[in-house]
Image (cartoon, grey):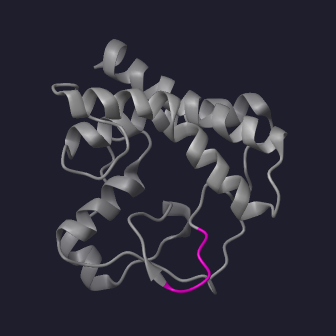
Amino acid sequence: MATFPHHYTTCEVKNLPGVNASYKKEVINEVGKYDETLFRGEDVDYNWRVMKKGWKVVYIPEIKVAHIHRPTWNGLINQHYMYGRAHFLVRKKWPDMYSYYPIKIDSLYSSLKWLASWVWFPWVDAYRKVKKINKSINGFDLFVLSTINIVNRIGSAVQRNIYD
């Protein structure tokens, strides 16, 4: 639940997980199908194309989806490692897409953004997610979510440096 959008009112968002999304027929006709060449991240790519065509991606909190997460730590870590690899591919396809992580390091700003993507954003993101699911900060939850975020970054770095 912590990795999905969690807002209290209907609002525009940058992305919705594909397991939780539905689209108007007009959107599908204009945007087309999911990019099946991606092994993960098809939903991120699709939502970006939806927004590039001028449509809005809207989160509606009254719509509930039961989602069964990975039952093992190994499965969860692998899932987020693969998400990181896919994130790099989607960012490579869409360099102007929003992201905390720079697609290339070619300036002081992108160098600082890259550094922050490893040492700042994983912890801030984990803190925000823990606050959404708990009223008080729990060290274990913070550790698990920040570890997942770092594993995601490792997946992105592996995709960039080994597979690409």
- Image position of 79 with respect to 135: above or below: above
Instruction: Name the spot of residue 74 as percent of width and height, x first.
Output: 73, 28
Magenta highlight: main SS: loop
Total numbered circles: 0
Front residue of 148/40: it is 148
Image quadrant where one finds the N terminus: bottom right
x 40%, y 26%: residue: 115
What residue do we see at 49% from left, 23% from top?
154
Coordinates of residue 123 in the picture (x, y in percent): 60, 39
Left or right of 135 in this view: 164 = left
Which one is nearer the viewer's eye here, 121 or 21?
Answer: 121
Q: Quadrant of residue 136?
A: bottom right
From the viewer's perspective, tell me whether residue 80 is left or right of residue 111: right
Q: Was residue 8 drawn as part of the magenta stretch in this picture?
A: yes
Q: Residue at x 37, y 75 (%)?
A: 57
- Asked whether residue 32 is in view, the answer is no
**Residue 70: quarter of image:** top right
Tell whether position 77 is magenta: no
Classify 126 as above or below 23: above
In the displayed structure, does residue 149 sit left or right of residue 77? left
Report the magenta residues as a range: 6-10
Q: Is residue 136 left or right of residue 64?
A: right
Q: Is residue 10 visible?
A: yes
Q: Residue furthest top?
A: 162
Question: Looking at the picture, how far across and down is residue 145, in whole percent?
Answer: 68, 41
In the displayed structure, 53 sits above or below 121; it is below
The quadrant the C terminus occupies is top left
The structure residue drawn at horizontal position 40% and vertical position 22%, both measured from the top left corner, is 157
